[in-house]
Image (spheres, rainbow, N blue to C red):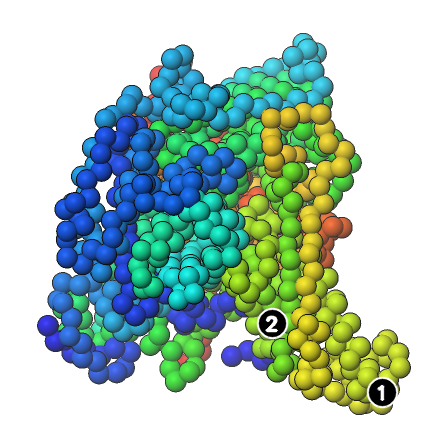
Amino acid sequence: MANPYIPEIGRSVPRADAAAKVTGAEKYATDHYGEGVLWAGVRRAGVPHGLIRGVDTTAAQALPGVVAVLTGRDVPGTNRQGIVHKDQPVLCTDKIRHCGDAVALVIAADRTILKTALSLIRVEIDPLPGVFGIDDALAPGAPLVHEEHPGGNVLLRAEICKGSAAEAFGACDVVIEETFEVPVVAHAFLETENGVAWQEPDGQIVLVVSTQAPFRDKWEIGHALGLPLDRIRVIGPYLGGAFGGKDGATVQCFLVLAALHAGGRRVKMWWDREENMLAGYKRHAARMHYRLGAKADGTLHALHCRLYYDTGAYAHLGGEVMAMGMEHAAGPYRIPHTLIEGWCLYTNHPVAGAMRGFGAAQVSFACEGMMDRLADRLGMDPLELRLKNALRQGDRNASGVVLTGATGIVPCLEAVREHLLWRERGPWIAAAGAFKRRGVGIAAVFNAMGYGRGLPDSAIAKVELTPAGTIRLYCGVSDMGQGNATAFFQIAGQILRQQNTVFELIQPDTARTLPSGSASAGRTTYTYGNALIRACEELRRRIVGRAALGLLVDTLDDLELLPGRVRHPATGREIPLAMLAATMTEPERICTSQFLMPVVRDVPDTGKAFVIGFPHLLFSHAAHLACVEVDELTGTVDVKAYLAATEAGRVLNPQGFEQQVQGAVAQGIGYALCEEVKLEQGRILTPDLTTYIIPSAPDVPEMTSLAVEVVEPTGPYGMKGVGEVGTNGPLPAIAGALADACGIHMTLSPLTAERVLAALQKQQETP
Amino acid sequence: MIIHFILNGQKTTLDVMPDRRAVDVLREDCGLTGTKEGCGAGECGACAILVDGESRLSCLMLAAQLADRKITTIEGISNDDRLHPLQDAFIQHGAVQCGFCTPGMILSAAALLNRNPHPTRTDIRAGLSGNLCRCTGYQKIVDAVEAAARRGEEAT
C-alpha cells in the first residue's frame, strides 16, 4: 500500500472509498440482510390506466410462509408521496396511472414464497383510455391522469421571457425553425432500488436504503405513513450508482410499512432489473420546437422555444426538471430577446424525474442543433459562431440573470479550438476508408448548480477530533459514486494537516449526521464542502488553542498543526492530538457549521410559475468535440475520439474531476446512440439490459478531458459541481459530427443505425 | 444436497437446495457480499466469479454447479492481506466510482490476464465487454488493467 499522505486540495488523491470497494468489503444497502430476514415485494398493476375494482389477497394470505399482505387500506397516514406535489400513492386504492403502480405489498419468509404470493393476488382493474405521450395529453377532451388537478393533464405551464422576442424576429436577417424529440431513458445504475428495515423494541423504525436523500426520505415516510419523524431513522450507505434515479422515494415507504407488520424482524426489498425499469424513475421524453433568429454576422438576436416534457404518471420532480430545461434552453449564449414556454404533462407513462443533466440534457440537443444549422445557413465556422455569442461573466443570461460567478464557456471553446482534434480534422476526415464517412462535431453546454432560488441549498458539516486523536467527518449527504467523500478528506486534510490514514467518514445516518440535502444538482461538494471548511477551521482553532495551554505558548501564531501533533517550532516541543483530545470534553471536540448556497439577488421578473428552483446563480460549462465515422452501408455511427474541455471552477482532485467527465460523456454517448425506453400504449418494450442497451467498454472511445480552471469565488477552494455538465454534450456533438460527415441533420434521438441509414437513403432519393 | 468445493482457497461444504442460484448461496449462506447482482440475467457482469480460474456469472449458475469446483470471489483474490495487482491498479488509476461493478470487473480482468497476459487496450475493452459500468466510461478501468498487466510483465 502507498505511504500515508496528507490529502490536500489540488492533488490526484486516490479515492477514500476505493480500497473497501476493490476488496468487496464495502457494504452497500444490498449487502445488509440479518438473521431470519423477511422479503417484501410489490404487486404492480401492469395496466397503464384504469380503475381498481378489487384486490383479492385471500389466496396469497393463505400461503404458508406469508407474513402479511397489505393493500392501500392498510396504509396509515396520507398514503401519498411526492417531493413537491403529494400525488403518488404508496399503494393505489382506486386508480391506476401507470403500469408500475403498486397495488399490494407482500411480506414473506423467502423470495420463492414472495414470488408465489405476489402471483396469487387477484387484481381487478377496469381499463381507462390512456394518455400515451405529449399529443395525447394535449388533445382536446383527453382522458385525465389526475381528475382533481386543476390544470388537467398540464402539471405545469410556465414561461421565461426577456426583451420582446415576438417583435425581435422582424429585425433578424436569418430565422430558422426546427422541432427536436428525445425519448424516455433510464439511469441503469447497477445497484437496483433496495433497502432493509426493521422495528426496534422501543418502536423506532430503522431503514438502511440506497438513497440520494436520506433526510427528505424521513419526511416522505412520516407524511405518507403518518409516523412521527422521531420514530424514523434512515441510514444511507454508499450507493451502487443513482444519477438522479434514487432522488425520491422508491422502496422507502414500502419497507417501513412492512417493518410495522414484521414483529421486529428485518425486512428486505430489492427490486430486480425489470421492476427497476417498470417502476423506477426515468429521464423525461421531450419535444422541443425552436425558432432562432440572428443577424447576418451571426449575432444571436431572438429565440422562441416551446418545450413539452412528458412527466409520466406523477408530478415527482417534473416541474422542476422542466424549469431547468427552460433555464438552459437558450444554451450558454447571449440572446437579447427570448421567450421560452414550457408544458410539463401528466401521461400514463413511467414516472419521470431527476437524471444527470436534469432537464438540460434534453434541450442541449435542440439548442446546439440550431447553432449548427445557423452556422450552415450563414456559412460560418460552427465554433466561431458559438464563441461569438458565448456568455461572459457580467452578461445577462436568457433568464435575465446577471452572471456574477465564474463563466468559463469562452476558454472551453478556445481550448477545443486549439486542440489537434479540431485543428487537424480536415486530414482526418479525408482519410475515411471505403463506405465510411467521417465528421467532427462540437457542442457548447452548461449546467446550473444547486437547488436554485426558493429552496435553501444547505448543508451542515460536523467534524470530530476523536478521543484517539483521529478525525471523523459526519456527512449527511450521500455518495452515490461521485466521490465526494474523497473531496471532504481533502478539505479536512488541507485545514487540519492530518494524514489520510486517520480520517474516517460517517455516511449519512439521520441519527448521527446532520441534514445536508440531497446528493443532486452538482451541489454536494460545493455546499457540504463550504460548511466543512468552516467546521474544520473552528476545530483547528480549538486544537491549537488547547495545545497552547499544554505547551505553555502564549501566542497561537507560533504553533504548527502537524500529522498527529501540534508543534512549537521555536522550542521543538510537541503535544500529540490524542493527549489534547483527552483534555477536551465532547462538545469541544466536535464542531458543526452550516452553509447556504448564495442565490440570485436581482431576481428577474419572469418564470413566475416556478414555485422553487428558479433561477440559478452558478453554472458549470463545457465544450465538447466528437469525431465520428459513419458506415454508409449500415448507418452505424462510431465515435472514434472525444474531447471535453470543462470549466467547473477550480479542480480539487484532477483524478476525481476526470472520473466525472469521462463517466458523464459515456452516459451521454449512450443517450446519443442507443438508449431509449421504448413504450407502446404505456407498456415498456425494453424491460432489461438486453433490450435497453447502455454502452459497454468497446462502445466508448478514448476520451480526452481538459480542465479549464476559472476560480469560483464562492466555491470551496474555488470549485463548482462537475457531475452533470458532461452529460449534456455528447448528443449534440455527435449529431453535429453526423451532419458534418453526411449532411443529415437529425431531429430525433437516439441516432441509431436504423435511423441514420433511413436518413442516408432519403438523402440519396432527394435530387 | 451436500456440495463440496474450494471457496477462496478453503475447503467448503454446504447443505443447499441444488436449484438455488450460486450468487445467493455465496452472498447469503457464505456471507460473501462482495459478489454483486445487477440484473439477475447475465447481462451486466456484476456477479462474475472465477470458476476454476475462468470468469463465470454466478447469477446464471445453480448451487449444484459449484460442486467440486475451485471458486474465487473478490474476497479471495488478494494474497495474505496483500492486494492483487488489479485491485491496487484500480485504486491508483481511479477505476472505481460507485464500485458496484468493481468486483466483477476485477475478476473478469483477472481471467482476461490469465488468458492474455499482454493485452492491448482494444483487447482489454473486448475482454471486459460483458461487464457493464455506468459510472466510469471504462477509460480508467482500461488504464488500470493495462497497468496491472505491465506490472505482471515486470514481475516475470
Three-letter amino acid code at the position of disc 1? Leu
**Relative horizontal placement of residue A17, taking residue B84 as reference (left or right):** right
* Circle on res. A472: 2
Residue A246 in view (yes/no): no
- Residue A481 lies, in percent from the top left, at 49, 57
Q: Residue at x 22, y 83 (%)?
A: B11
Farthest right residue? A554
Q: Is residue A688 above or below residue B46?
A: above
Which quadrant holds the N terminus of chain B? bottom left
Q: Quadrant of residue A99?
A: top left
Q: Nearer the viewer, residue A287 or A215?
A: A215
Q: Is residue A270 above or below residue A90?
A: below
Disc 1 designates what residue?
A552
**Relative horizontal placement of residue A262, taking residue A621 as reference (left or right):** left
**Relative horizontal placement of residue A234, taking residue A193 as reference (left or right):** right
Farthest left residue? B1
